[in-house]
Each structure stands twice: as C-alpha cells, then as structure tokens.
Amino acid sequence: MVFEREIEAFLRHLETERNLSPHTLANYGRDCRRFADWCAQQGIDSLTILDSQHLRSALAELHRDGLGGRSLQRWLSSLRTFFHFGVRNQWLSHNPAIGVRAPKSPRKLPSVLDADEASHFVALTDTDPLACRDRAMLELFYSSGLRLSELAQLDLPHLNLAAGTVLVVGKGRKERLLPVGSHALAALRQWLPQRAALASTGCQALFVSQRGGRLSTRGIQDRFHKLSVSQGMNTRVHPHMLRHSFASHLLESSGDLRAVQELLGHASLSTTQIYTHLDFQHLAKVYDSAHPRARKKPDQGGD
C-alpha cells in the first residue's frame, strides 16, 4: 500500500502523544488507508504531488459511493490531521486538505433519557457482586457524565470517597476533577468490598470483570445492552446516552453552559451547545402541554 510507512508513523504519534482511544485510532487508520487506496488506483505514489484537487476528486467519488455527510467530514478531518503531521515531518510542503470542504449533513441531536427513566435504569436491586458493580458503574456514569473510555480507565487511586470526587483522564490526556453524587458514592461504597474479593492480585482497575481483570469498554457496552432488557427500558441504553442525559438534565436545571462544558471536558463550547437544543425541545413540550393557547387554533370566523 502507498504511504503505509507514513500512515503507521502518524498512528503511532496519535497513540503515544495524543493518547487517543483504540476506536478513534482505528477510524484515523481506516480513513487514511481509504485515501491511500484511491491514490494507488490513480497511480499516485508520492505525497509531494498531492494537491487540493486530488482531495476533491476523492471526496466526490466517496460521495457517489454513498458515504454520508458526517462520514465524509470525518474522513476529511482525518486526512487534514494526517497532512498536518506530514508537513511537520517535512513529507509535504503544504497541507492539501486546507480549504477543501465536505458536504454538510443535518446535525442529529443525541438521544437522552428523561430524569425518571435515568433513575429507573440505574436503580438495580440485586445484591450479588456483579450487580453491585453494575449499579456503581451506572450511578457514576450518570452522576459525573463520564465518557465510556474514561470510566474503563479508572483506577482505585482516582476515586476519593471522602472528598466525593473522581479524577478523570480525558481526551489528549487532559485531567479533570469531577464531583460524585451521593447515590453514586453509596453504590461505590457497596461495590468496593465486593471488588476486593474479585480483583486479581495487583489489579488497580476500579471496575473489574468476573475473572478479576479490568472491565473493557466492550464489556461495559455488553452490560448496558443486557441491563436495558432486564430493566425493561423502552430503548436500548448505551453508555453515551447516560452522559448525554447527565448534560441535558444539568443544563435544564442550572442553565450554566460553561459549567456543563467543564464537567464534560469539551474543548470547545460549541460542542456543548447541542444540549441547549435539547433543553429547548423540553421547554417547547412543556409549553405545548401547559399553555392554554399553545395548540388551540385561532377562530376562523370573521367579525
């Protein structure tokens, strides 16, 4: 494959210097290799001859093949980052992706649970060790708005029960100290003695599997799927849905967008602003159901 050496160096950089998740690394690798395949078909075997027209041609072909707007935007973003790395390493004199735009697609609002649904989902009643673990895991997710990867990476020293806080390492290895709610603290206190009996020697992970090792992101996703069924949820609940619900409910109650941004660990406020749309949807529903003239049709007769 053309550019294989450069792509491998780029992925090592993302893994070691930017601490990106395996899922994100896989996306970058897939996007870069997809472009490398296109270049090979066009007889292009050197990065130095690439220009913006090559990018536009590849983009147009992907669009014709049915790739959606969001996927095209991610593909172009991956290549823009790859080429920036290439300029830094003097493989390229310029970034050919600068100025190239992908077609826009409507922004899809994230799915959230309402407060009652979220409370019902996390309220597990079984008392066996794995149920205690799952309850602590769900409560912490909803209490502190963690990402899936952040929760899976938590170690025992990250948790401070006395202070009611958890230290999270987010994207780009950025740390943030988050408050932990009383329900989550109670569930964690019940889980820790059970964890001590399950965990393998030397394992520091806060959440462990039945075999005693760190519970993986895939393992957590599988637990969410099974709990969605056992808790009688109307929809399949995934980890990010609890994070979205945390953000939406907090913004709905406080109205403090900056605070929600800090708690979520968003680098840009524009990322957090999507929750203002969710909040408006909630307010619109309240208005429609409560205002005496909200849905009444005006009198059609004349004076």
Image: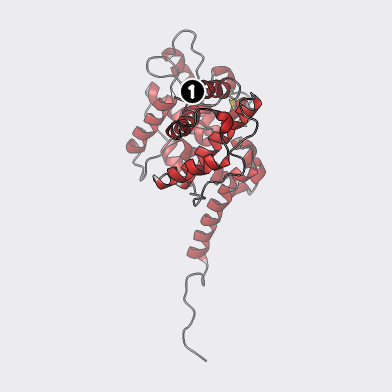
How many marks the image carries: the answer is 1
Image position of 189 with respect to 277: above or below: above
Image coordinates for residue 117, horizontal then vertical, percent: 43, 44
Q: How is the image coloured?
A: secondary structure
Asked whether, in this view, residue 177 is left or right of residue 103, the answer is right
Give how far across and how far down residue 90 sits, in percent: 64, 25
Look at the image and tell me whether residue 118 can be seen.
yes
- The spot of residue 300 in percent (x, y) is 46, 84
Asked whether, in this view, residue 105 is left or right of residue 51, the answer is left
Kind of residue indicated by mark 1: Glu
Q: Residue furthest top?
A: 201
Residue at x 34%, y 33% (from the top left corner)? 226
- Graded by Cα atoms within 10 Å as few (under 14), some (14 to 19) or many (20 or more), the crowding at tag 1 reads few
What residue is pinned by disc 1? 4
Left or right for 86, reference 302:
right
Q: Residue furthest bottom?
A: 303
Q: Residue at x 49, y 64 (%)?
A: 288
Q: Out of 288 and 187, give the one closest to the viewer.
A: 288
Reply above or below: 101 against 282.
above
Instruction: Tell me the quadrant of the picture where the N terminus can be found.
Output: top left
Q: Residue furthest front?
A: 43
Q: Is residue 154 visible?
A: no
Side of 183 relative to 94 (left or right)? left
Please say if 149 is above or below 111.
Answer: above
- Which residue is nearer to you in this view: 241 or 36? 36
Element marked by disc 1: helix
Q: Position of residue 6 (x, y in %)?
A: 54, 23
